[in-house]
Image (cartoon, helix red, strand yellow):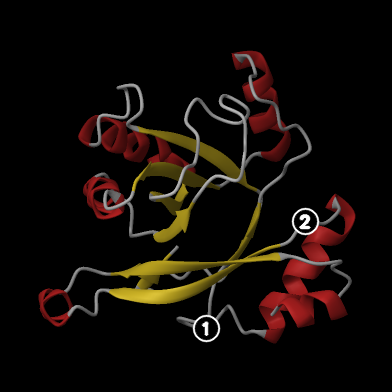
Amino acid sequence: MLSKAQECGATGGTIFLGQGTVQSNKLLDILGLNEAQKEILMIATSEESCSELQDKLSEHFKFSKKNKGIAFSIPFTRWKLKSNEEEKREIHREFNPSHYCIMTIVDKGRSKDCIKAAKAAGARGGTIMHGHGAGVPIDYYFPLIIEPQKDIVMILTPKDNVTAIMDKIIADLELYKEGKGVIFALPVVKISGLIENKGVRV
């Protein structure tokens, strides 16, 4: 996919390995087949070329078909460590996102608890990644360093479900306590391949 993206004008990208969660099925749970290996490709590109690049990749890899994959775009034109409520409302008005990408960083082994809480609040599943720090100063991005033995859970959901899902994760995983984890949501401005009856969720 990265090669195709470069053919379409992308200058490069970063590939992550992840685990997608399959819809609840007792037999799959017993057989240990309730997770699917995934590759996550992140590409930074200009606002002008973003939509065209996503459309070309979606068409080439047939994201409109079941279980072929999902592509979505997140704006980073106004990324700030801290923003007031008026700035947040302005961003929502400008992009008017239909979906959000909820990111949760927790201790390794707690990702399944995170997915369980999210599903209880209406999420259809998520993708789990494993991360570690690389000399990032404390408080540079978040009030928690991404050290070895951390799980990163990515959940894509309609905007109407965001608050309920985040509140449930915060409550069940006690993220209101210091050092328990971090959760935040990013607006999604364009999405391809999200099928309602899909077995594997992002």
Percent position of residue 77, x then y: 79, 38
Say how many tags the image has: 2
Q: Which residue is drawn at 21% across and 48% down?
A: 120
Question: Which quadrant does the N terminus fall into?
Answer: bottom right
Q: Quadrant of residue 167?
A: top left
The location of residue 86, given as percent across then percent down, is 65, 15
For mark 2, give the secondary structure: loop
- Is residue 19 shown above or below 137? below
Q: Does residue 136 appear left or right of residue 122 in this picture?
A: right
Whether residue 179 can be seen here: yes
Is disc 2 surrounded by few (<14), some (14 to 19) or many (20+) residues within 10 Å?
some
Secondary structure beneath dot 1 equals loop
* Vertical comparison of 106 with 39: above or below: above
Q: Which residue lies furthest to the front in this view?
A: 135
| Residue at figure coordinates x 26%, y 69% from the top left | 23
What percent of the width, then of the height, locates residue 75? 71, 44
Instruction: Name the front one of labels 2 and 1.
Output: 2
Q: Which mark is residue 65?
A: 1
Amino acid type for the residue under numbered disc 1: Lys
Q: Residue at x 20, y 68 (%)?
A: 24
Residue closer to the observer: 70 or 138: 138
**Can residue 196 be seen?**
no
Whether 65 is drawn above or below 189: the answer is: below
Quarter of the figure with the C terminus: bottom left
**Residue 44, numbered label:** 2
Could you tell me which residue is drawn at 25 percent across and 55 percent down?
112
Q: Could you tell me the amino acid type at mark 2?
A: Ala
Nearest to N terminus: mark 2 or mark 1: 2
Foreground residue among 84 and 108: 108
Calculate the distance from the C-alpha at mark 2 to the C-alpha at mark 1.
25 Å
Quarter occupied by residue 85: top right
Q: Position of residue 56 (x, y in %)?
A: 77, 77
